[in-house]
Amino acid sequence: MASRRVSSLLSRSFMSSSPSLFSLRGMNRGAQRYSNLAAAVENTITPPVKVEHTQLLIGGRFVDAVSGKTFPTLDPRNGEVIAQVAEGDAEDVNRAVAAARKAFDEGPWPRMTAYERSKILFRFADLIEKHNDEIAALETWDNGKPYEQSVQIEVPMLARVFRYYAGWADKIHGMTIPGDGPHHVQTLHEPIGVAGQIIPWNFPLLMLSWKLGPALACGNTIVLKTAEQTPLSALLVGKLLHEAGLPDGVVNIVSGFGATAGAAIASHMDVDKVAFTGSTDVGKIILELASKSNLKAVTLELGGKSPFIVCEDADVDQAVELAHFALFFNQGQCCCAGSRTFVHERVYDEFVEKAKARALKRNVGDPFKSGIEQGPQVDSEQFKKILKYIKYGVDAGATLQAGGDRLGSKGYYIQPTVFSDVKDDMLIATDEIFGPVQTILKFKDLDEVIARANNSRYGLAAGVFTQNLDTAHRLMRALRVGTVWINCFDVLDASIPFGGYKMSGIGREKGLYSLNNYLQVKAVVTSLKNPAWL
């Protein structure tokens, strides 16, 4: 359902293109457009939800942090405090790990039938759908993403992922293997134990589902740390998990900061596995802490600088719309965003003009308003970082076609920004900006663009826009990335594995492949006496 909605969103975007759109010219017209938008972001709508859960979820109960500390979670529309949230640290992680270990070693979760586990997960998915609007409102309020995106796409995808893994729960099994002698050989696929999971702020609920879903289906128990910017929606979801019948201690949720709670999970001697989504720099720290403690298994989904390649045979209007979506979706705060737009020289000038016009048309404003495409960035740190990279682009000599500044005087809104004449060695072409900044580069032929696209420390994803099947096949095999989208982008169905090459991470999430992250394989060999057959 969710993937179809994403596809329909793209289809509506293509249909919205019109000849009059592309008649816009000049920065003066853009300045007037941004002036109108700036006025629109000053007045905020009261979110249609109340914050009810701000404590840690440990052992099936909401509890305060041992220290009694709290921290504010802020509304990115205006920087005001939404709520004070319990600040977990190492002592709280110890409590959560102890609860998870007890639930794994003594509790019913890994001992109940896989079918019983699946029924709980299916009930949980039903509850997500029942509370769809409430969950979506919390997600938007805390994160800044458009409410229509949360309510129509992301929360339904959350339910879909849990249904997908509920279906897998009773289909996980080992093998019998023919041996070379009189032995019965079998493998058992066993839950790995206590899993530590650290999720990011850009897609809090979706990343929660990508981690909790396979871990629970395999029979593990979990300590999950939310991002300090976006702790609220996970706590509501945790309540619904227990309402669905999840035993106490199976899922424990700790809100807090990476340097304290996150580090405590990664280095904990009683955590058997850690999964992290976030920046490459922090991923290195997680890997180091895991290796220095108990050498726990690690999966990492990290940064990206994904190429989006527009070939010479492309329908330019559709390519512009898809490239726009690939970059600007979720305020540009996507690890797999198509943040290096490579355009063939034959269509480059036309593409740049139309990309500029599309950015000027983008509807930015309070994410709770209908029809809004772009809300604020998540916080002041991200806001300042993006503006810094925009300055880098201007100083390096790239041509600023649209945007380039903040929008309004309140909150963390940034004008949709487009650069042309970008060179490969510019920081805006090498670094992960994580914001609404499109960089457009020119190429001559496939050999050139393959080499340039692969010349990155990242390898998370890529987009290809072409009508030529041979071109598509050549690029899909040549690009050193974990996902290649051809004439589409951000299709993230529950069954499709996601992860990267190079410094974009280790392992895969979603799909069948993610189950391997939460299983141990045990070989069992039994001697046979006088077997009837081998």
Image: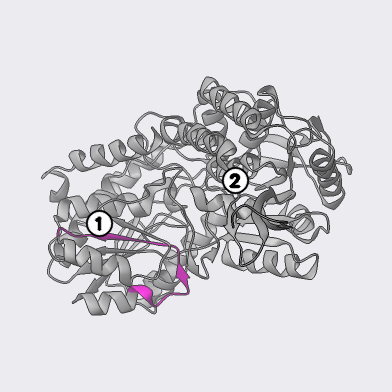
What number is the disc on residue 173? 2
Which residue range is magenta in the image?
A: 453-467
Q: Quadrant of the rendered structure where residue 258 is?
A: bottom right
Q: Residue at x 85, y 41 (%)?
A: 102
Q: Quadrant of the rendered structure where residue 429 is?
A: bottom left
Would you call the spot at circle 2 few (<14 residues within 10 Å), some (14-19), or many (20 or more)? Answer: few
Q: SS for tag 1?
A: helix
The reply to whether residue 312 is visible in this rendering is: yes
Alpha carbons under labels 1 and 2: distance apart? 61 Å
On screen, residue 281 above or below 356: below
Decide whether residue 29 is among the magenta residues: no
Mark 1, residue position: 27
Q: Quadrant of the rendered structure where residue 315 is?
A: bottom left
Q: Earlier in the sequence, mark 1 or mark 2?
A: 1
Q: Residue at x 29, y 75 (%)?
A: 450
Q: How many marks?
A: 2
Q: Tell me residue 130's x, y (percent).
A: 53, 20
Residue sitting at the far top: 130
Q: Amino acid at mark 2?
A: His
Q: Tell me residue 307's x, y (percent).
A: 34, 65
Q: Tell me residue 168's x, y (percent).
A: 54, 39
Q: Residue at x 66, y 61 (%)?
A: 298
Screen quadrant of the N terminus: top left
Instruction: Mark 1 vs mark 2: give the one in front.
Output: 2
